[in-house]
């Protein structure tokens, strides 16, 4: 296996195997054995690129834990992008809206080992302009909406939030 992509914390890795350059394999911290993704290489790269936008340290972010039955309503103004699930993020769904990306995934405690919060989802939006996220104030959240631009946070705060990407201003 030749790893071509992994996240900074090595929670997941994607790799190609010698004779099959279009078949992508995935391993994750929770499931370290390699398995074949349902997506081919071009779809995998599009999936990763779209997901990465939501975590881009130059974008403004808004995220919260909300009740399951409110999660789909929170994303009613955006369009879901159909990607095959990855085992490192099996229930994650990605959405695109005008000038924003949204991700919905199972809510968890934010610590290792991860334990999921029953009956809740984590919803995250990312946008280039902070004003594009103002609508989140009208969406009920269990833990309140957190809004920030990662690149504007001090390095220790970024580390505490699990934002490990370096930016040109870091």
Image: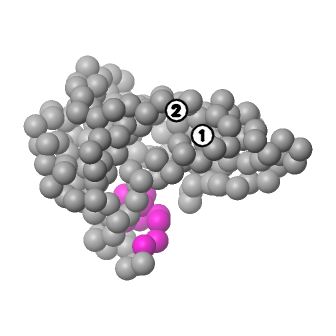
Which residue is nearer to you in this view: 133 or 162?
133
Residue in the picture at 31% in, 73% down: 154
Q: Is residue 65 magenta?
A: no
- Most common secondary structure along the magenta stretch: loop
In this rendering, is residue 36 above or below 50? above
Lateral position of residue 135 relative to residue 78, left or right: left
Whether residue 17 is visible, yes or no, is yes
In this rendering, is residue 98 above or below 130? above
Where is residue 49? Give x, y as percent.
Answer: 51, 51
Task: Find the magenta span and give its range.
Answer: 158-167
Residue furthest right in the image: 19
Residue in the picture at 38% in, 63% down: 57
Where is residue 164? Give x, y as percent.
Answer: 47, 64
Q: Earlier in the sequence, mark 1 or mark 2?
A: 1
Residue 83's label in the rendered image is: 2
Q: Is residue 165 magenta?
A: yes
Q: Quadrant of residue 58?
A: bottom left
Q: How is the image coloured?
A: one colour
Q: Look at mark 1 in the image and give the residue it sits on.
A: 43
């Amino acid at each position: 296996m030749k790893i071509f992509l992994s996240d900074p914390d090595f929670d997941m890795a994607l790799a190609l195997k010698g004779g099959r350059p279009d078949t992508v394999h995935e391993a994750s911290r929770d499931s370290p054995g390699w398995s074949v993704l349902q997506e081919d290489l071009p779809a995998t790269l599009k999936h990763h690129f779209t997901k990465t936008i939501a975590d881009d340290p130059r974008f403004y972010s808004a995220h919260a834990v909300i009740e399951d039955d409110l999660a789909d309503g929170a994303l009613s103004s955006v369009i879901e992008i159909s990607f095959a699930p990855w085992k490192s993020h099996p229930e994650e769904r990605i959405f695109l809206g005008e000038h924003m990306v949204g991700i919905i995934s199972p809510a968890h405690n934010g610590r290792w080992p991860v334990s999921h919060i029953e009956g809740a989802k984590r919803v995250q939006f990312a946008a280039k302009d902070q004003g594009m996220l103002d609508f989140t104030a009208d969406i009920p959240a269990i833990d309140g909406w957190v809004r920030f631009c990662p690149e504007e946070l001090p390095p220790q705060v970024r580390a505490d939030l699990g934002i490990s990407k370096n930016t040109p201003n870091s």
